[in-house]
Image (cartoon, rainbow, N blue to C red):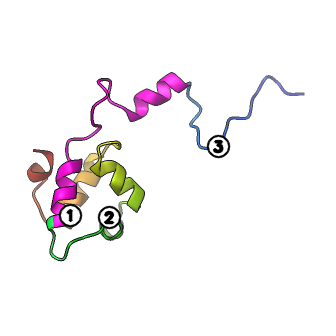
Amino acid sequence: MSFGLRRRPQGRIGLPNQQQEFMYKNKNGEFNNIAGKNIARHRKLASPKLSQRALADKMQLFGIDLDKNAIQRIECGKRFITDIELVAFSKVLEVEIGELVT
């Protein structure tokens, strides 16, 4: 008996494709964050210069579980940033939050 249930492919969250798109993209198709470019700039200006992997490692010391790929997606604007992550970025990069969002 199958009860009409279908197995969903791995990696999917179970929403119809149209709803999944809106979870990851702005309605206007632009960036999903305004801080990503500034995070990348401050990461490269850090002394010593931080790699994306090193930044991810430092974020984990603040309890934020990010990997190098998540940092890359944040910096290019493809991933949303939570307020908790933004606070941690400002502490790790030793800049004010305002410098990241302007």
Dot label at residue 9: none
Which amino acid type is marked by label 1?
Arg
Tell whether label 3 touches label 2 (CB within 8 Å).
no
Determine the residue positioned at 20% across, 72% down. Answer: 49
In terms of secondary structure, what is the magenta stretch mainly? helix
Query: Quick one: 3 or 25, which is closer to the camera?
Result: 25
Q: Element at badge 3? A: loop
Mark 3 is surrounded, within 10 Å at the Cα level, by few (under 14), some (14 to 19) or many (20 or more) other residues, namely few
Which amino acid type is marked by label 2?
Gln
Q: Is residue 8 left or right of residue 14?
A: right
Determine the residue positioned at 29% across, 53% down. Answer: 85
Work out which residue is located at the far bottom of the displayed protein and give it: 48
Q: Give the residues drawn in magenta, as a range.
A: 17-44
Identify the residue under disc 3. 10
For marks 2 and 3, the one nearer the N-term is 3
Determine the residue positioned at 22% across, 57% down. Answer: 40
Identify the residue under disc 1. 43
Mark 1 is surrounded, within 10 Å at the Cα level, by few (under 14), some (14 to 19) or many (20 or more) other residues, namely many
Determine the residue positioned at 85% across, 27% down. Answer: 2
Image spot of residue 37 (x, y percent):
20, 49
Identify the residue under disc 2. 52
Q: Nearer the viewer, mark 3 or mark 1?
A: 1
Query: Quick one: 78 or 93, which is closer to the camera?
Result: 78
Work out which residue is located at the far right of the displayed protein and give it: 1
> Residue 43 lies in magenta, yes or no?
yes
